[in-house]
Image: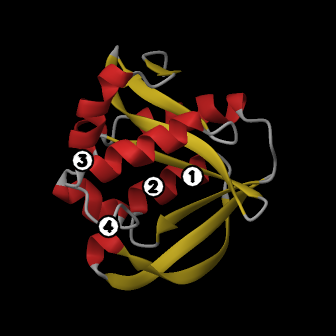
Amino acid sequence: MADVALRPIDDADLDALFDQMRDPESVRMAAFTAADPDDRGAFDRHMAKLRASPDITLRAVTHQGRLVGTISSFVVEGDTEVTYWVDRSAWGRGVASAALGLLLDLVPVRPLYARAASDNAGSLRVLHKAGFAIVGTEVSYANARNAEIEETVLRLG
């Protein structure tokens, strides 16, 4: 999808990203979110940490020139994982799939891992289309649902 692009996150993006990442339906779907999506101070501290880390590839996702989310890779316990957030207004348009394809070109590390709430069919579909395969499930606490839920773990390469 030629109208999806990745770019570094600018300070001017933070207000829009904060609003996107606190949309109640999006938060529930993502499940594994900040403890309090409405805490702007925690959001700003988290984004500053991500943007300053040399071990994290963090990009803004744009669709037709409009900021619609973020995508990143990061290392946890020696494994590189990917994660993304796409504004609900862009769901179902191939934006996440296109952004993930662009990130996979930027991040040559393999294997790559990803996680999604097991009931998040849209995100699981995006990951499958990119070549990720399910390698297991875990039960983890999801802040957005205030409960332990099943999380699907996927691997690429």
Q: Is residue 94 visible?
A: no
102 is higher (above) or lower (below) than 32: above
Residue 53 image-quadrant placement = top right
Q: Decide: marks 3, 1 in contact (CB < 8 A)?
A: no
CA–CA distance in space, label 3 to label 4: 12 Å
On residue 127, the disc is 1
Q: Which secondary structure lies at badge 2?
A: helix
Q: Type of residue at label 4?
A: Ala
Q: Which secondary structure lies at badge 1?
A: helix
Give the number of the mark in front: 1 or 4. 4
Dot 1 or dot 4: first in sequence order is 4
Q: Decide: marks 1, 2 in contact (CB < 8 A)?
A: yes
Give the number of the mark in front: 3 or 2. 3
Q: Type of residue at label 3?
A: Arg
Label 2 Cα neighbours within 10 Å, binned few <14 / some 14-19 / many ≥20:
many
Q: Which secondary structure lies at badge 3?
A: helix
The residue identified by callout 4 is: 35
On residue 123, the disc is 2
Give the number of the mark in front: 3 or 1. 3
Dot 3 or dot 1: first in sequence order is 3
CA–CA distance in space, label 4 to label 2: 21 Å
101 is higher (above) or lower (below) than 1: below
Residue 68 image-quadrant placement = top left
On residue 40, the disc is 3
Looking at the picture, how far across and down is residue 122, in whole percent?
40, 55
